[in-house]
Image (cartoon, rainbow, N blue to C red):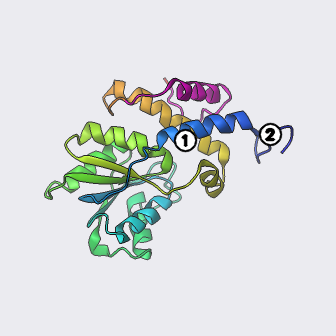
Amino acid sequence: MVDGVRVTGLGRGITDDERRDAALIWDYHLMEHEVRPCSVGIGLGSHDLGVASFAAELYRRRLFPVLVFTGGNSPKTAARFPRGEAVHYRERAMAFGVPDSAIRVEPRATNTGENIAFSRELLATQEIDSVLLITKPYMQRRAFATCRKLWPEVDIVCASEPLSLADYSTAFGDERLVIDMLVGDLQRIIEYPKLGFAIEQQVPDDVRRACDRLISAGFDSHVLRS
């Protein structure tokens, strides 16, 4: 710590004010839903293998009888998950005790809208009245808004590993990139309803100001470009 700034490996350090802004956005992303039994669990693919591990824990708690993993590849995950996000998630869940018979794999989706739409197609022959969306912590709200738009008739419960921003950043290994991703997801929550991708979510003024400050400070690698 130097003059209130913790020095990171690359570039300048992250200030305490920037961490407070990031924490405000992190908390906003969390839906704080009470986890309850649902017709199906859906684990949304990403770089975060913790989604699969936590999905396995929720299955073992008997919160759903069927677990869908959805996700193909993106440029950011192809090296980590060469056979596709959902395939690697399935293997992780099986290693944590979920039987293969309880898992269904949707291997095509390349974005959140496709995660929801393709999972819905996969489950079309089943009677589904509620879904438990399992995501990265900072993706809960965007997943909820997307699912409510594309699958409006089901009840939605969001869940993710119970980690603080500090713990998640430590586990991820790149605090600056985590903050970039928080900012990028918030921007999508704001902009995607205008494009018809998600329902609108109320964003408090202090959260918007925190986002603007972080973008101005250079935390912008994941923002939408016009």
Residue hosting label 1: 26
Q: Position of residue 135 (x, y in %)?
A: 43, 52
Query: What's the distance in space between the residues labelled 2 and 1, CA to CA?
Result: 20 Å
User: What residue is drawn where x is 48% and y is 40%?
Assistant: 29
Q: Position of residue 139 (x, y in %)?
A: 45, 45
Label 2: few (<14), some or many (≥20) within 10 Å?
A: some
Q: Are marks 2 and 1 in contact (CB under 8 Å)?
A: no
Give the quadrant of residue 207: top right
Q: Position of residue 136 (x, y in %)?
A: 47, 51
Using residue 159 as the reference point, say whether residue 79 is left or right of it.
right
In the image, 77 versus 161, the foreground residue is 161
Residue 7 magenta-drawn?
no
- The magenta region covers 201-225
Q: Is residue 149 visible?
A: yes
Tell me the quarter of the image containing the N terminus. top right
Using residue 117 as the reference point, say whether residue 206 is left or right of it.
right
Residue type marked 1: Trp
